Image: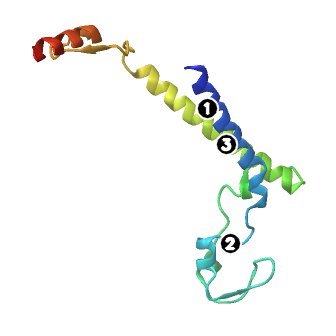
Amino acid sequence: MKNRSWAFLAGGLLVALLLAGVVSNYASSHPDGLDSSLLKGCAVDADDTIVGGSCPAQQAKDHELGDSPLADYGVRGIENSFVSTGLSGVLGVLVTFAVGAGGFWLLRRRGGTPTDPDETTTAGGEPTTSDDDARRRADAAS
């Protein structure tokens, strides 16, 4: 890969890490659209705990992975919520990047052999260069 490609990739990864590690802490703490629609018909207190009414959110159960190390947008065991949220975002970006890079690496490894960009193939599968193409066009024009 060219140096410009590596620089672009590194810059994109740096921006993603910055957004996930810092900016994610300033996201809204209010429920998103799905949570809000499930709470319609219920009365909630300041901590978003249902205190009355009837709504689909009352049927909610704890998720099977609720005790996992990265549950609830944080890292279990880190008491500082700013650091915990930022670290979980950074870990998420790194894991996603690693899986994506690994997938592209596998696809690249399975592909055919790379060809010279100046080289094409004819209908019979024989390689032709751009010089051959230029000669062929000049012959056709005369």
Q: Position of residue 44 (x, y in %)?
A: 74, 84
Q: Position of residue 36 (x, y in %)?
A: 63, 77
Residue 140 vs 76, above or below: the answer is above
> Are the two marked residues, 3 and 2, in contact with CB atoms closer than 8 angstroms?
no
Q: CA distance from mark 3 to mark 1?
A: 13 Å
Amino acid identity at mark 2: Pro
Q: CA distance from mark 3 to mark 2?
A: 23 Å
Circle 3 packing at 10 Å, graded few (<14), some (14-19), many (20+), is: many
Q: Which residue is mark 2?
A: 31
| For residue 79, side relative to residue 109 (left or right) | right
Q: Which residue is mark 3?
A: 93
Q: Residue at x 45, y 20 (%)?
A: 109
Q: Which residue is mark 1?
A: 9
Mark before the other along the chain sequence, 3 or 2: 2
**Quadrant of res 31:** bottom right
* Disc 1 secondary structure class: helix
